[in-house]
Amino acid sequence: MSYRNRDRTAFTLVELLVVIAIIGVLIALLLPAVQQAREAARRSQCTNNLKQLGLAMHMYHDAYRSFPIGAYAAWGHSWSWPILPFMEQTAVYEILPNAPSDSGSYGGSDATSVALVKLMRTPISTFFCPSQPDGQTEPTEVNGLTGRSISSYLANAGGDATQDGLGAGGMDQSNGLFHAVRMNTSSPTGRVFKFRDAKDGLSSTVLLGEAVYDIDPDKCYLCDHFLYFHPNFDSSNGSDFSEALGSTYDPVNPKTTDGNILERSYGSFHPGGANIGFADGSVHFIPETIDGATWRAMGSRKGGEVVELP
């Protein structure tokens, strides 16, 4: 019996290293494209969130002939709670027994009531931009409560709001479509607005938009904007309304370390700008490079400016 010797071929070490290097180069080339595709999908979902919130605002307006209050002073809700029934979230809306009285109380409930805590811990994905690296709830204790739901979006207080309280430069006297409202005193402040109040045109007036405290999450501590309520709404003077309301006074994604500016301004984790919803229901990506005067004009409801969207 005879056997034929067959030559066996195999990779040499050098050839194997070359193949591995080629695969590594291909992965390095493809990874940015994959990341860009994922970010594009996240940005698209964020745009859709704003459209859904804008639609809910329109439906609320159709039902009540005005937009909701931006934020109540004295343990009040923000604009996000009243629109829940128009987002197929009636069950979440009904967690709270009733609307606030002028004193700011909720049928005798307070910040530690079972219903209020349950609501404050109930996140809704429509209020959350998927590009935001944090979760939908705040793990850190805030005023004795952990797990508070957060929001990626702020309603527009105006282009002239320079501080997050009440009074001069505050969010009860600003020129946007949402005010902080104090009703539990002899001198109530703030008001609600209607479509007709947007004298500059619905398509030119900001309704709401993305907001982050700092685009570098490593620099952010207790930096989330809270959904429904904020613990500091309980001041008779009002404070911290920038947890629910934003201002176009400052740039998109402002390059600053001033916490007050970061908290009230619009911005996002999307490269180069932020998604902004307008009063006509449209959503536009506003770049960080937008002219400051133009951006402030977009925040005002009746400044008389002619605005051209980028």
Image (tube, rainbow, N blue to C red):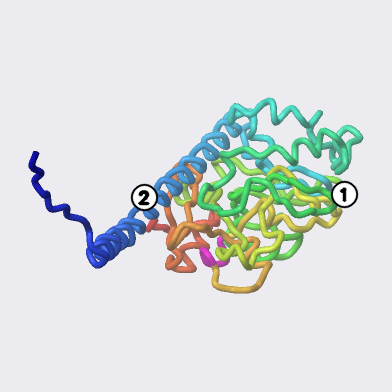
Q: Is residue 155 left or right of residue 46?
A: right
Residue 188 shows up from this direction: no
Tell me if mark 2 has few (under 14), some (14-19) or many (20+) residues whose alpha carbon lies within 10 angstroms of its own.
few
The magenta segment is 248-253
133 sits left or right of 142 in the view: left
Q: Position of residue 305 (x, y in %)?
A: 46, 59
Q: Quadrant of the N terminus?
A: top left
On screen, residue 257 above or below 135:
below
Q: Is residue 249 magenta?
A: yes
Q: Is residue 18 above or below residue 3?
A: below
Q: 270 or 173: which is nearer to us?
A: 270
- Residue hosting label 2: 37
Residue at the image point whose x is 51% and y is 58% from the top: 269
Local SS, label 2: helix
Q: Residue at x 8, y 42 (%)?
A: 2
Badge 1 crowding class, 10 Å Cα cut-off, few under 14, some 14 to 19, many 20 or more, is few
**Does the magenta portion include 74?**
no
Amino acid at the residue labelled 1? Thr
Which element type, helix, strand or loop, lies under badge 1?
Answer: loop
Going from N to C along the chain, the mark reached first, 1 or 2, is: 2
Name the residue beneath numbered marker 1.
Answer: 185
Q: Main secondary structure of the magenta part?
A: loop
Please state the horizontal and vertical placement of residue 179, each as a whole percent of the image. 68, 50
